[in-house]
Image (tube, helix red, strand yellow):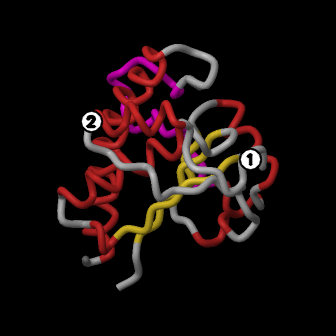
């Protein structure tokens, strides 16, 4: 059976998208689906290629039990638009950048991550890079909620595949 695949994208791949990757991996593991879903993250810009997630992101995530330390930033590649089933942007700027790079026949894969948590009233995960500690906590709150909605979506997709 083919793995379902999800790519989380933010600008630099050091705050929001690695947090989403870590949170969603943990939820998949808890649901017993880790082997059926491939998860990765990338940046729409190559500012931080090869760097670990921002220390503040790591610290706040670890307080909630998410270890981001093994992740390394990378930039979105053309092959990602073919390889991933879902490519989830953290905000409208990220989504616009992805839409510019994505072949038209693959654009159905692109979505805002927060579309999986409409109950929050937030369309985007705000960039915490220039904010204080509260910004990183807000990111985690939003990411945890959207990840739960995404998990339900992925479970439906896997059932449809006959997993």
Q: Name the image quarter holding the C terminus.
A: bottom left
Foreground residue, 30 or 152? 30
Helix, strand or loop under label 2? loop
Rendered residue at 28%/42% (across/down): 148
Report the magenta residues as a range: 108-125
Residue 99: image tag: 1
Tell us which disc is closer to us: 1 or 2.
Answer: 2
Foreground residue, 53 or 143? 53
Position of 154 compared to 105: left or right? left
Q: Give the percent coordinates (x, y) of residue 48.
A: 72, 47
Q: Is residue 117 magenta?
A: yes
Q: Is residue 95 magenta?
A: no
> Dot 1, crowdedness within 10 Å: few (<14), some or many (≥20)?
some
Q: Is residue 36 above or below residue 17?
A: below
Foreground residue, 96 or 12? 12
Helix, strand or loop under label 1? helix
Q: CA distance from mark 1 to mark 2?
A: 33 Å
């Amino acid at each position: 059976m083919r793995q379902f695949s999800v790519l989380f994208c933010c600008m630099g791949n050091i705050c929001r998208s690695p947090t989403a990757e870590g949170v969603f991996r943990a939820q998949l593991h808890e649901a017993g689906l880790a082997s059926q879903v491939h998860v990765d993250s990338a940046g729409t810009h190559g500012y931080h290629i090869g760097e670990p997630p921002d220390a503040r992101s790591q610290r706040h995530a670890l307080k909630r039990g998410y270890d981001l330390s093994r992740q390394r930033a990378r930039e979105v590649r053309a092959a990602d638009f073919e390889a991933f089933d879902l490519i989830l942007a953290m905000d409208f700027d990220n989504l616009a950048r992805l839409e510019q790079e994505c072949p038209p026949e693959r654009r159905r894969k692109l979505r805002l991550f927060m579309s999986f948590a409409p109950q929050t009233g937030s369309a985007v995960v705000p960039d915490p890079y220039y904010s204080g500690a509260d910004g990183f906590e807000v990111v985690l709150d939003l990411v945890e909620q959207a990840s739960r909605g995404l998990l339900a979506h992925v479970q439906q997709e896997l059932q449809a595949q006959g997993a």
